[in-house]
Amino acid sequence: MTATQTAALRVEKLDRVFDVSAPFLSRLLYRQERRYLHAVNDVSVSVPSGGCLSLVGESGCDKSTVARLITGIYPPKSGQIRFAPGRSGQPLSAQMIFQDTYASLNPRWRVKNIIAEPYLHRIVEHAETEVVFADPKHPCTRLLLETIPDVNSPHRDRKIVAGEVPSPLCPPSGCTFHPRYPLAQDRCKIERPSQEARPEGARVACHFA
Ligand code: SF4
């Protein structure tokens, strides 16, 4: 979104933690500590007026939790969700539409479609659909696009991301994508990348993208 466009929705530094502790008696009997699941961490996205936000990614990447926070089903622990006023002067609201990833990534959509890709409680890439298709930056996005069937070359070699999304109760250190990325560097294992703005309008969380 450019500086001159009005944001219909602005989400800033959204956080949500769930208490997933065992029941009190079990904790007492087995001397267990309380356990907390940091499901959404520092999520910021904005959607221009007339636009649509597609949350895409693998199962278990907390897309639904982010959507439930934005639509007000879950209250956030911290952060802000701001809708611009509509024609009546009342703030706009959001509605969830569940659909398959391939349809969400359709670049022919007429509305300004913003893609945000969560991976293990954080947004790793956030940009307009055309920008993501033209030049996906984050390795996770590139691998996700690889999974889209291509009718023109149905037998092409596809690089499918190996492994599964790690448990959010025990996330990997540094960049949480590093255990599944064969080209990860030492820095990826110790330092969490922050989301940086790119000249073409994307925001990407990767040390090397
Ligand atoms: S920070 Fe490292 S592991 Fe994470 S996406 Fe970038 S290159 Fe891959």
Image: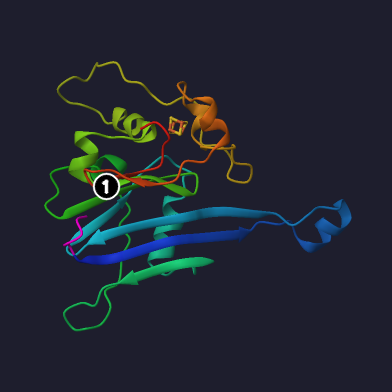
- Disc 1 packing (10 Å; few <14; some 14–19; many ≥20): many
Q: Where residue 113 sits in the image (x, y, percent)?
A: 21, 52
- Residue at 49% x, 34% y is 177
State the residue at coordinates (34%, 71%).
82
Answer with left or right where residue 52 lies relative to residue 67. Answer: left
Image quadrant containing the C terminus: top left
Type of residue at label 1?
A: Ala
Question: Whereabouts is ligand 1, in terms of quadrant?
Answer: top left
Region rendered in magenta:
1-5
Is residue 100 positioned above or below 139 on the image? below
Q: Indicate the position of residue 120 as horizontal and vertical percent values.
A: 50, 44
Q: Position of residue 171 (x, y in %)?
A: 59, 41
Q: Overall secondary structure of the magenta stretch? A: loop
Question: In the rendered structure, does residue 33 fall within the stretch colored magenta?
Answer: no
Residue 185: % across, % down: 50, 25
Measuring 25% from the left and 82% from the top, which residue is drawn there?
Answer: 90
**For residue 146, what is the image quadrant?**
top left
Q: Which residue is located at x 24 percent, y 65 percent?
A: 7
Residue identified by numbered label 1: 127
Query: In the picture, which quadrant includes the N terminus?
Result: bottom left
Is any part of residue 106 visible from this angle?
no
Location of residue 93 with respect to 180 vertically, above or below? below
Disc 1 element = strand
